[in-house]
Amino acid sequence: MMKNILLAGLAAFWATSALAHSPLDSTTPANEAVVTQMPTEVLIDFKGSIRLTRVSITHADTHRMDMDLGEQTAFMQEFALPMHDMGAGTYVVEWRGLGDDGHALNGTFSFTVE
Amino acid sequence: MPDAFGLAAIITKFALYLGVMTAAGTVIATMMFRLDRTRGLAVAFAVLGLIATALAFSLRGANLTGDLSGMTDPEMLGLLWTTPVGTALLLRLLGLGLLIVGLFMGRVGIWLSVLGGIVAIWSFDHVGHVPGRDTTSLDIALTLHLLAVALWIGVLTPLKRLASSSATYASAADVGHRFGVVATVTVPLLIIAGGYMGYALVGSLAALVGTGYGQALIIKVLLVGLLLGLAAANKLRFIQALRLGDPTAAGHLSKSISIEWLVVLAVLAVTAVLTTNQTLPS
């Protein structure tokens, strides 16, 4: 009985829990923005210093590619990631990183090129 | 619901808390109450703590890459090593290592084991929600809270063992009584330190009721309340009766400690959810 209550309780927290920490200050293009021209780079601005570990771009739900982060080897607040033009459609950027306090961070944003 | 990695992280953290707290608590209780035959218990939980420490660190690597490869990726693990997570890993390995070595060093070794246990507990100051706040008073509160919790957990199994054989009923009564005296200081300390941290991290009644973190904290407090009830029954009834030579009290005490253990496991599980999966109210 007690175990069931506990399990139900735990399930409820999971359901209400958000992604740990929301460290993103802003992005350019902004999340869900519609732009007329493909940007040459995407700017990601964090509230604190982070080290990006993985960034992938998915275009129109089909083409997914991992970005080369070879040159990003420091904890920084602002990142400019070069973009490849894959045509019109929605671009989803998924990123993962490590905050300088040791917390793993991740998030997603998207923009649409007309 | 959390993904597979989130779930693995919670289970690993639960094992980490169980291992570190029980190992540290067992050696502290052994020193304080001059207990016998606790080495196997302390070693077993210290080894559990070591395995969980390594696994938890490795899982953080997976968090950075989003797949299993991160668990062994030297670049990711090397990166983690440079952060407070690396410091905590070092302190945990060092602390649990000292704890185990001390157990094989004869009579003076227990001091080394206790030191190791304190170092392992102190490692929790370096990661998680409390260190992020960057305040010394929270660090001190967390350490005191955990030491008091460890002692409580550490005394359970040895006491249950003493209460399970008529030859050691007198020792059970004696250890139970002495722990009861110590607990009049450590348990209020545990509650005050916990209450202070809860207030500092949650901050308002609205956040307590309205956020996942707050709600998990409420469940934790309710469980601890249950634990206090069981402990009070042990202290005021069963140990008292056992001291007066009532042999039936030993059975009650033993059963009560088993239930206490179950509630302790539930408290540690809620804590693992709280520290892994919950965002602090901002």
Image (tube, coloured by chain):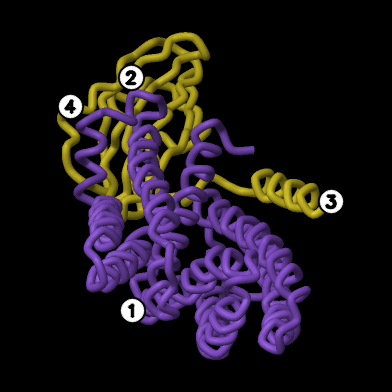
Chain colours: A yellow, B purple
Above or below B11: residue B242:
below
Is residue B93 left or right of A32 when viewed as pictured? Answer: left
Q: Residue at 41% of width from left, 10% of height from top?
A: A87
Residue B32 picture location, percent across and down: 41, 80
In the rendered structure, which amino acid carries the disc numbered 1? Thr
Q: Is residue B271 above or below residue B186?
A: above
Distance of mark 1 from mark 4, alpha carbons? 38 Å
Point out the image quarter for the N terminus of chain B.
top right
Is residue B180 shown to the viewer in this render?
A: yes
Secondary element at tag 1 = helix
Q: Which mark is residue B136?
A: 1
x and y percentages locating residue B178 in the rendered image: 53, 86
Q: Are marks 4 and 3 on the same chain?
A: yes
Disc 3: which residue: A1
1 and 3 marks on the same chain: no
In this image, B167 relative to B72: left or right? right
**Which quarter of the figure has residue B30?**
bottom left
Say which of B211 and B93 sits in front.
B93
Amino acid carrying label 3: it is Met
Q: In the image, which disc is placed on residue A70?
A: 4
User: Does mark 4 fall on the same chain as mark 1?
Assistant: no
- Mark 4 to mark 3 CA distance (whole Å): 53 Å
Chain identity of mark 2 = A
Q: Is residue A61 left or right of residue B73?
A: right
Would you say the residues marked 1 and 3 are in contact, meaning their CB atoms lie under 8 Å apart? Answer: no
Subunit ID for the residue under disc 1: B
Mark 3 or mark 4, which is nearer the start of the sequence? 3
Instruction: Mark 3: give few (<14), some (14-19) or many (20+) Cα within 10 Å.
Output: few
Q: Nearer the viewer, mark 4 or mark 3?
A: 3
Distance between the alpha carbons at the discs numbered 3 and 2: 48 Å
Label for residue A66? 2
Three-letter code, disc 2: Asp
